[in-house]
Image: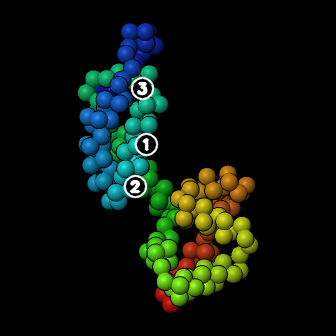
Amino acid sequence: MLHPVEEGEREAAVPVDVEEYYRRYGPMVLRRCRNLLKREELAVDAMQDTFVQVLRHREKLEGTAPSSLLYRIATNVCLNRIRTQRRHPEDVDDELLDRIAALDDSEPRVLARNLIDRLFARDPVSTREIALLHLVDGLTLEEVAGEVGLSVSGVRKRLRPLKDRLAGLAEV
């Protein structure tokens, strides 16, 4: 089992081979993440985060029976994501955004532009930038906050009314 190496044992301990664990246990970790998160893209991210955790702490770990630790780390990563999602739901109506982005004809493009203009009509230009960084470019709230020079709560405060208006426009 992977477990912390005691101080006196550090010289004799060989760090775990994270690359080998990734090849060998990656599918198991991904299955666990899929089972908990129910969405492929979230599961893949969580699997990567699981191995990042192992990579960060590989010098402190000893590699006997790693599957149980990887399973536990994956479970914790997924549960933390679920908790965060419940506390701070960030999903906007992705289907509506996808439909707008997929429009090819000139008339639908004009309609889409009008919809976007209506959506941002009451907001400063910086709010449009925040929305694009987060919703289109996929940056986290923390990354957006760093880009635009606001706090995370400031970014969230700017996005909240947009999400409400977007939901209202989707009903129309």
Residue 50 visible in the displayed image: yes
Horizontal side of residue 80 vs 2, given as left or right: right
Give x and y (percent) for residue 45. 41, 49
Q: Which residue is mark 2?
A: 42
Horizontal side of residue 7 vs 143, given as left or right: left
Residue 169 visible in the displayed image: no
* Secondary structure at numbered mark 3: helix
At horizontal 65% and vertical 64% (from top left) the residue drawn is: 130
Q: Which residue is mark 1?
A: 49
- Residue 5 lies, with reference to residue 92, above or below; the image says above
Give x and y (percent) for residue 171. 48, 87
Q: Amino acid at mark 2?
A: Leu
Mark 2 or mark 1: name the one nearer the start of the chain: 2
Q: Amino acid at mark 1?
A: Asp
Give x and y (percent) for residue 102. 46, 75
Q: Which residue is mark 3?
A: 58
Pointer 1 local density, CA inside 10 Å: few below 14, some 14–19, many at least 20: some
Mark 1 or mark 3: name the one nearer the start of the chain: 1
Q: Amino acid at mark 3?
A: Arg
- Residue 162 lies, with reference to residue 74, above or below; the image says below
Q: Closer to the camera, 44 or 104?
A: 104
Q: Which mark is residue 59?
A: none
Q: Where does the N terminus fall, quadrant-wise?
A: top left
